[in-house]
Amino acid sequence: MSKMFQFLKPYRLPVSVALFLMLVELFVELFHPLIMAKIIDEGILKEDLTVVIIWGSMMVIMSLLAFLSGITNSFFASHVSQSFGFDVREKLYEKIQSFSFANSNKFPTSSLITRMTNDVTQVQNTVFMSLRIMLRAPLLIIGGTIMAVVVNAKLALVLLIAVPLLLLFLVYVMNKGWSLFNAVQQKLDNVNGVMRENLGAIRLIKALLRAKHEVNRFTDANEQLKQKTVAALRLMEITMPILLLLMNVSILVILWFGSIGVENNQVKVGEVVAIINYSTRITAALSIFSFIVIAFSKAKASASRISEVLETEVDLVDTTEMNNSFQIKDGKIEFQKVSFTYPDTKTNILENLTFTVSPNQTIAILGSTGSGKTSLFQLIPRLYDVNEGTILIDQQDIRDIQLEKLRRNIGLVPQEAWLFTGTIRDNIAWGKEDATLEEVIKAAKDAQIHETIVQLPKQYETLIGQKGVNLSGGQKQRLSIARALVRKPKILLLDDSTSALDVNTEAKLLNALKEYTCTTLIITQKISTAIAADAIYLLDEGKIVEKGSHEELLSMSTLYQKIYESQYGKEKVNHA
């Protein structure tokens, strides 16, 4: 929770005003019973109407003051809590954006969504309650007990015994509730995870008739959430009856001894009424306290989950020693004895890779699934850091290049074509914020998607759904390629991003890429793509086992011959 208080520092003044107004309300509430006692003892019992009018008027004025203080307090409390929530969400989002791939792998997407929405809301609501009633309730309990002692110490002895016992009980419930509500939030993560997967793959679920199976998955996750929530709320709900039972017993004891004191002229009627009044107010505050305990337990669990994200150390950051003036000019890539292992694993994905790609050269990389092709691509823009060895671009270690300068000059088209809700123009220009319409059209033409776009009703202003749900696989791939081309990169990485294109379209695309003065690496499974490259690298189990031109590999590489045979037939291999 201490991490969360830092977000309240910019709002010290409104927080102070809200707390002051809350204390005004508290002051009025604590002094009302005293005034009431005075009205009874000196006004009603002595039949002095003047005393009743004077002190009654004072009560009305003080009540009006408390009313105005409460309204103004709510305004400031709302302002602080909403601003606090805005700042926390913004900081969380900035932190997540700074994550490396390794950091992102530690948190499921559904969990991050829950933390940025539900968890922040829990803490935000607790801030509001703290400034409105959360601090007022314990202060009223303590203040009411003290005032009762001031009125009559003997009668207040009952409260001095009961109140500390109840407070200890509430502390126990709050600590127990924190662990329970932490488990509830984790189960909520699971529910959101299942929902996210289902909504993202709804077409596949319908096509394969897996709706019943997915409903069962959701029901199971939902049932676990229900059980954890019931267990947490059951603990919280038993607090109210226990609080009311003990306080009502205390009030009966006070009335019993109070009546005896009045009969013996040892206690004034007004004193008994005042202490009973304090007791009922303490009872009401304790009742509120049970809700406060629930809110605070949830907030503590949520704050812990938020802090876990904020305190995560980002493993890929710029340092002051970096070469801030470096610019990629040629796009020469050198791997020097590079080995790579994913975090929290032990098996090398890439092992002792050494090769050089000359500027403006096109390299095709072939290999079986799991051979390390995509991992190799992720190392070049430094989405992960190498475990051993060095990667150089234009003879500069990429670990010494500012991340923004490095990645701004690299166009990466991943295996999965990710598009965003918006227009086609927006999606292409997403690769370059200040791209003009002419640049967007040029990139679309080179990516072989322009003719498709101009046939649409609104052309480049056509809206597409999230992830391009209203586009074919080939169209999404070509838009993703256009998005990379619009930034005119010095290094272009195509991760099997032409798999959905027909041979003719792919040939036109590869021919258009020759106009770009960039070094191009293409991961592919298609021999037709590899033939157009300057050189072909065969990757197997994280190692480059063969490299050369199409003709060279076809004549000397058994592995390449098998790949060629699988696509063109054995007769073609022999003929070649």
Image (cartoon, rainbow, N blue to C red):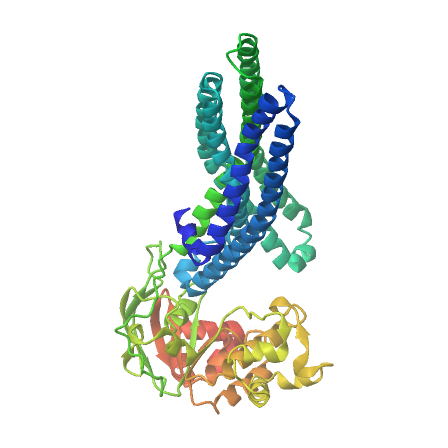
Of the pair 137 and 117, the residue shown nearer to us: 137
Instruction: Give the quarter of the image for residue 475.
Output: bottom right
Give coordinates of residue 19: x percent, y percent.
Answer: 49, 46
214 over 140 or under it: above or below: below
Give coordinates of residue 509: x percent, y percent.
Answer: 54, 85
The outermost residue toward the right is 457
Would residue 541 be seen by someone viewing this image from the given angle?
yes
Would residue 308 be seen by someone viewing this image from the given angle?
no
Of the pair 513 and 221, the residue shown nearer to us: 221
421 over 170 or under it: above or below: below
Q: How many marks?
A: 0
Which residue lies at the image location 37% right of the left edge and 64% below the top edge? 541
Which residue lies at the image location 57% right of the left edge and 75% below the top edge? 477
Of the pair 146 and 210, the residue shown nearer to us: 146
Horizontally, residue 103 falls left or right of residue 454, namely left
Instruction: Give the quarter of the image for residue 340.
Output: bottom left
Give coordinates of residue 342: x percent, y percent.
Answer: 36, 59
Give coordinates of residue 569: x percent, y percent.
Answer: 53, 75
Of the pair 538 and 81, the residue shown nearer to us: 81
Instruction: Give the quarter of the image for residue 327.
Output: bottom left
